[in-house]
């Protein structure tokens, strides 16, 4: 028996579906796309998404810089104080007393350095001012009698042009002067905020960290805890190593200025010490002050020798201290240090240059830890150091004794 006859509508629908399938097959060009191009495009759109996320993050940081900068400053100061602070906790010093000693000691050291700078400048400023005026007169005499053979009128005309330029920019200077009040207010607010964050981290760093990890899904918390702890250890190593590098820079340039007879050698050394926390460029910029003082006070030959001393110290830092000390401490290549400092300065100026290296070290260690799945391989030393060193010693002893009794 023959089957039931197909309806005309079913036949037409089947022909239409067959034609649509044929057209789809003929227009599908995916088999003809090379495998390398598929891989490249897959990487490309993922990189675009990552770049967009990083761009949004940088934009948010720039918009919230009045909050982000004090936070980063407090974290960096905490990293500097961390070895001494944890040492006091291990010696059974009460936490509140350890916080007071660390904070008050830091304020005393910084205040003492600043007082030393002010005292030295006040003591030697009249002599430096006199020598500076004499150097200016000598330079005017050189312009008039030297190869340029400038006349008194030409020199005065150049000075008049400079004053005229300043007057033309008077509106910009006035608006900048008006903004000084807000800038000082921002600095004062940021200082108070950074001080408060520092106290909170020292007083309850473990509690803050536990609250932060609870923002992540439960399954991701071991990875977050281990990665953050490893990154924190790298930041502490960076701060400790940078403190040593800054001390060597300050001692080297300060001793060079002292033996060459350059005035204000101690203030120069202190400024070099503070400026050295901005890697690569900080000590050079502050060292130029010593060259300027040597030029106006001691003459060009002493200024040349002062420049040689600064370059020698910088070569020692760049070729010995940074590769051996900083490279092993933060696991970042010196070339990467230069690039991230330059990039940070382009994006965020001085704060960007200051925080570029510790951020790069943190990101590098975190990425390596997550890629190696360190929380699964038992690499918990860094995490234990972060958590246990912030827990009061008495509570730690009680937990240890309870574990021993249960065992």
Image: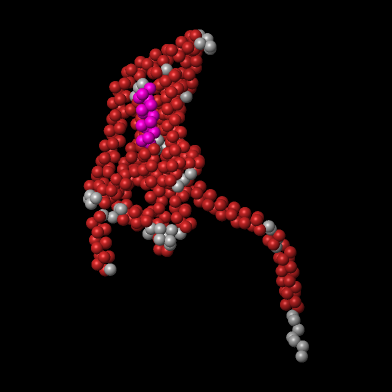
Any magenta on residue 249?
A: yes
Q: Picture coordinates of residue 125 (x, y %)?
A: 33, 21
Relative placement, left or right, of 132 versus 40 is left
Main secondary structure of the magenta stretch: helix
Q: Return the x and y of residue 219 as percentages of the image width and height.
A: 42, 64
183 or 74, which is in the foreground? 74
Q: Is residue 186 visible?
A: no
Q: Give residue 156's position: percent from left, percent from top.
A: 47, 12
- Number of residue marks: 0
User: Looking at the image, is 218 positioned above or below residue 290?
Assistant: below
Q: Hey, which residue is sitting farthest bottom in the picture?
A: 1
- In the picture, which quadrant includes the N terminus? bottom right
Q: Please give the name of the residue rendered at 24% of the width and 63% of the height, measured from the top-left corner.
A: 401
Q: Which residues are magenta?
A: 246-260
The image quadrant of residue 252 is: top left
Q: Residue at x 51, y 47 (%)?
A: 55
């Amino acid at each position: 028996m023959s089957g039931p006859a197909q309806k005309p509508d079913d036949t037409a629908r089947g022909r239409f579906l067959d034609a649509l399938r044929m057209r789809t097959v003929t227009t599908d060009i995916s088999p003809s796309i090379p495998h390398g191009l598929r891989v490249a495009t897959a990487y490309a759109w993922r990189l675009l998404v990552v770049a967009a996320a990083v761009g949004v993050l940088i934009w948010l940081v720039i918009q919230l810089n009045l909050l982000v900068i004090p936070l980063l400053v407090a974290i960096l100061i905490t990293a500097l104080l961390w070895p001494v602070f944890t040492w006091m906790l291990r010696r059974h010093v009460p936490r509140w007393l350890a916080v007071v000693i660390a904070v008050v000691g830091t304020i005393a050291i910084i205040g003492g350095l600043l007082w030393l700078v002010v005292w030295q400048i006040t003591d030697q400023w009249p002599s430096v001012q006199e020598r500076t005026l004499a150097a200016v007169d000598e330079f005017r005499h050189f312009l008039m009698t030297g190869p340029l053979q400038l006349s008194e009128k030409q020199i005065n005309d150049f000075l008049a042009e400079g004053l005229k330029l300043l007057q033309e920019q008077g509106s910009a200077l006035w608006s900048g002067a008006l903004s000084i009040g807000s800038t000082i207010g921002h600095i004062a607010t940021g200082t108070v905020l950074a001080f408060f964050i520092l106290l909170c981290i020292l007083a309850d760093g473990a509690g803050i960290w536990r609250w932060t990890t609870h923002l992540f899904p439960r399954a991701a918390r071991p990875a977050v805890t281990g990665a953050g702890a490893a990154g924190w250890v790298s930041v502490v190593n960076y701060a400790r190593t940078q403190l040593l590098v800054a001390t060597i820079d300050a001692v080297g340039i300060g001793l060079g200025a002292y033996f060459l007879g350059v005035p204000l050698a101690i203030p120069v050394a202190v400024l070099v010490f503070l400026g050295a926390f901005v890697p690569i460029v900080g000590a050079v910029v502050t060292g130029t002050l010593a060259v300027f003082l040597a030029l106006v006070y001691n003459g060009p030959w002493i200024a040349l020798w002062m420049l040689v001393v600064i370059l020698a110290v910088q070569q020692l830092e760049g070729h010995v201290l940074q590769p051996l000390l900083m490279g092993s401490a933060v696991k970042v290549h010196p070339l990467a240090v230069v690039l991230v400092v330059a990039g940070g300065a382009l994006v965020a100026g001085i704060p960007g240059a200051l925080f570029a290296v510790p951020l790069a070290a943190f990101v590098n260690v975190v990425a390596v830890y997550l890629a190696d799945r360190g929380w699964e391989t038992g690499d918990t030393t860094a995490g234990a150091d972060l958590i246990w060193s912030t827990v009061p010693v008495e509570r730690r002893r009680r937990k240890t004794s309870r574990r021993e009794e249960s065992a």
